[in-house]
Image (tube, grey):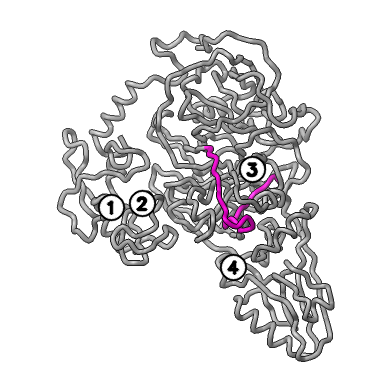
Amino acid sequence: LCCECGQAHPLLDNHLYNFQDEVDDELICHICLQPLLQPMDTPCGHTYCFKCLENFMQEYSFCPMDRKKLSFQQCHKSSLLVRNLLDKLLVLCPFKAECQQSMQRCELEAHLQNRCPGFKKYKSELQRKKNPISRGKEDPPARGETNMPKDPEVPSGGSSLVAESSGAAVVSLGTAEPGLVNPAFEETEEGESLVQKTSLVAETTTIEIQREDPEEELGMRIVGGKDTPLGNIVVQEVLQDSVIAADGRIAPGDHILEVNGVNISSVTHCQAVSFLRHPGPVLHLMVLQEKGFSNKTAQQDSTPANREVIHVTLVKRDRSEPLGIKLIRKTDEAGIFILDLLEGGLAAKNGKLSRNDRVLSINGQDLRQGTPEAAAQIIQTTESRVNFVILRQPGVQLGEPVEDGSTSNSSSNSSNGGSPVHHRRRPDQNHYRRKSNYQKKTVAIKKEPKESLGITIGGGRDNKNKLPIYVTSVQPIGCLFRDGRIKRGDVLLSINGIDLTHLNYYEAVSALKSNAASHSVTLKALEILSLNSPEPSLDIREQGFSWSPLWITWLGLPSYLHFCQDVVLSKGNLESWGFSIVGGFEESKGNQPFFIKTIVPGTPAFRDRKLKCGDEIVAVNGVPAIGMSNSELIPMLKEQRNRVTLTVVSWPGSLV
């Protein structure tokens, strides 16, 4: 039964309520024909439940009532007045036999959790029926006895690198280790079962994109790369009326793993852009797509005979040290599997665990039917030695052999979040660092009054991303081309003493034109320097695009050019915020910004639609995040029970 409405329904469907009185037809969703839940208004004046409309728009591109053209991005939350009216509708407690109370719809969840004798009885019965994961089906083992897997022990076969399954997987965002804990998952105090507590469903899918014009841009923005804390490549936005939008299968938040068979999960941002901009009539993309939370229980155990059992021991320096492992459940196979080993983490340095290894037990506790959350709890409570028994498919190897941890950056203890990749990344020296990666320049030139500057600009504080003014091209007809010091991509700070940094696009155009009429012009600009060697193919390919700077370029801007905005999220007591973060202070890398890596479908962060993958978190409830570690910021986010204010900077992803 759902812990919010007390009734049985699919996890991703709307809650069900027993309304005391007949509800006015104006408050009914014309898709599900039930009173509106999380109402969303369309531009054509109709209102539907959030989930109903979202599901409908995945198949159709018109309004269900008048069939006018419509996209989900055009819709917005109904007014607070409408939402309050709906929340005040009277409902009956679903446990009629033990409880005859009625209350406002918004009060039902608290009633079930704190006051309802029927729901309390249901939870008690459920608790009695289920067995703890660490015990067998019969009597509990005697003290000191462990339920070890029955599979025969086979000596370690080294550290083969195993390909990640391309089938559906359940990605755990629920581990509570520092560096892996995510605000997308939040434990409750109600003692829910570990199986009942949901994991995040994600599917690895191969998508074929057809292009009539091989040179046509795909129409999506991407963020991430191995030279940033995000690690892998994430879709930030899909542009309307683009090739990707017309295909309809790729959405913001998808992780791009391969392009035309080339693994891009461990390449730099510039390299990923180059791969995705490569022309061609057909493009094959392998993507990891998050589908929301699922409480599907593990399936029956089945152990193929052609696998080997390996024992691995990891030694923590203290109880709080993270192992650097991301664990998953799969929908088509019982048990827990290793999705990723975090670069620089304890497990990666050890070198004996591999991706796609199945975890049979940890410290003697049988996890063949377990969950990632159960495994995380065992790891957290272990003081020092963590003993794994894992099952591995022999003989499958990808990429380069693993380097011994003793020869790599042994001081690095990465908490940069996991990446669903196909081979282990080598330690890399080009980690993203927030440094002053720019140089100021003042350009004073003499010119004829009628001679134009000869530049085009983009950005402006009226832009969706509130960007500073930057140069998009230097034309060969103006005085700036002749001078040669102003280049494409330069951020313009002022012209003849007039500040351009706070102007919108049209104000900046006007200021540049009016000052270009004088005999002398003094421009102050900022040139962004690349941390990485330039990618030669990028400039060639960009000629076919409406040019704009790469996402990674914006990360080098000084803070006074950042436009910060507050995003306020609200949630119920049993909900999670619905996003995960990477970055933060580390001894080996210093201060790194915090970035939003994933936004989980169906959660408060997803419904609010203001946060995007790649957004930088500057502060939480007014408290600056600079200098905090990952393990400091995450508990701070989890402490906010129903409301949190995030101060973020949002830079547009690179267009491909």
* Residues tagged 2 and 1 counted as in contact (Cβ below 8 A): yes
Mark 1 — residue? 31
Q: Nearer the viewer, residue 120 or 578?
A: 578
Q: Secondary structure at mark 3?
A: loop
Q: Amino acid at mark 4?
A: Lys
Q: Nearer the viewer, residue 642 or 359?
A: 359
Mark 4 — residue? 466
- Crowdedness near tag 2: few (<14), some (14–19) or many (≥20) residues, C-alpha within 10 Å: some
Mark 2 — residue? 56
Residue 260 got which mark? 3
Q: Amino acid at mark 3?
A: Asn
In primary-sequence order, the first of circles 4 and 1 is 1
Q: Amino acid at mark 2?
A: Phe
Q: Secondary structure at mark 4?
A: loop
* Residues tagged 1 and 3 counted as in contact (Cβ below 8 A): no
In primary-sequence order, the first of circles 2 and 1 is 1
Q: Amino acid at mark 1?
A: Ile
Q: Quadrant of the C terminus?
A: bottom right
Residue 557 to residue 154: above or below: below
Q: Disc 4 to disc 3, how far (Cα)? A: 35 Å
Q: Residue at x 58, y 28 (%)?
A: 338
In primary-sequence order, the first of circles 4 and 3 is 3
Q: Disc 4 to disc 1, how far (Cα)? A: 37 Å
What is the magenta range? 204-226
Q: Which marked residue is nearer to the observer: mark 4 or mark 3? A: 3
